[in-house]
Amino acid sequence: MDAALEKRQVERAYELYAPVYDFIFDWIFAPGRVAAVKHLDIQRGDSVLEVGIGTGLNLPLYPPACRLTGIDLSAEMLDKAVERVQTLAMPNVTLKVMDATSMDFADDEFDKAVATYTISAVPDPVAVLREMRRVVKPGGVLVTLNHFRSERRVMGWLEDLVAPLCTRLGWKSNLALGPLLAAVGLEPEVVARANMFNGWRLVKCVNRK
Ligand SMILES: C[S@@+](CC[C@H](N)C(=O)[O-])C[C@H]1O[C@@H](n2cnc3c(N)ncnc32)[C@H](O)[C@@H]1O
């Protein structure tokens, strides 16, 4: 299956999810969201990029004194984020439809970048993390929050087993953390467990260039 086809699959999947996404995913993933934004340690004036911002469920967690840019491939998901920005009256937020594998930003444009529940939902996670590294300044912070393939044998095997079904639904159930970070040259400063059954991992890295 070629990457272009996968990208269309993701677009189609999130076009369908957009109207019901918040209803299903808000409360389940809320504790991880709080932890992810906290680990960004946002300072006054920081320029922050949120990759795959979706419907903008993280928006209420950002301090007003930062400049936030949110991008997403799905116009339907982003429409919901636009509504949320208006409801929350956040003039410090800019939203753009953009493919995270080829971002429209200059090198070193942001202080920090975050992707929550996104890295396993993109067709090419390595390309997305490479782009995040490119647009974040040297010494800046990268935070990802995601479900990664379990290192436990049985669980990992189960995640491999359901992978074809999950791919059809729009995400990867068996994305392995170690090889992913190695492929983009990142070393984690923090790996913390999050959410129900500690099934998700929050990974904080410093962008050493
Ligand atoms: C599971 S949702 C997570 C949304 C949001 N980050 C959250 O925490 O609720 C994954 C998001 O990634 C977006 N996405 C998938 N591939 C993308 C890409 N190549 N570039 C930008 N966004 C992408 C999808 O459109 C979707 O909104």
Image: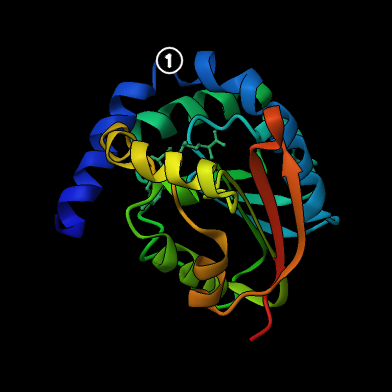
* Disc 1 residue type (three-letter): Val
Residue 127, horizontal then vertical, whole percent = 40, 68
Observer able to see residue 148:
yes
Residue 192 is left or right of residue 20, and the answer is: right
Q: In which quarter of the image is the N terminus?
A: bottom left
Q: Which of 64 and 138 is in front in this view?
A: 138
The residue located at (47%, 69%) in the rendering is 131
Q: Residue furthest front?
A: 154
Q: As displayed, is residue 30 above or below residue 190?
A: above
**Where is ligand 1, by quadrant?**
top left
Callout 1 secondary element: loop
The residue located at (34%, 31%) in the rendering is 14
Q: As displayed, is residue 41 above or below residue 84?
A: below
Q: Which of 56 and 16 is in front in this view?
A: 16
Q: How crowded is mark 1: few (under 14 residues within 10 Å), some or many (20 or more)?
A: few
Residue 178 is left or right of residue 141, and the answer is: left
The residue located at (46%, 25%) in the rendering is 80
Observer able to see residue 74:
no
Report the colour scheme. Answer: rainbow
Residue 46 is left or right of residue 118, and the answer is: right
Residue 72, horizontal then vertical, whole percent = 42, 45
Q: Quadrant of the C terminus?
A: bottom right
Residue 71, horizontal then vertical, whole percent = 47, 48
Q: Which residue lies furthest to the bottom in this view?
A: 209
Residue 204, horizontal then vertical, whole percent = 72, 60
Q: Nearer the viewer, residue 48 or 160?
A: 160
The residue located at (41%, 31%) in the rendering is 77
The image quadrant of residue 46 is: bottom right
Q: Name the residue under label 1.
A: 20
The image quadrant of residue 196 is: top right
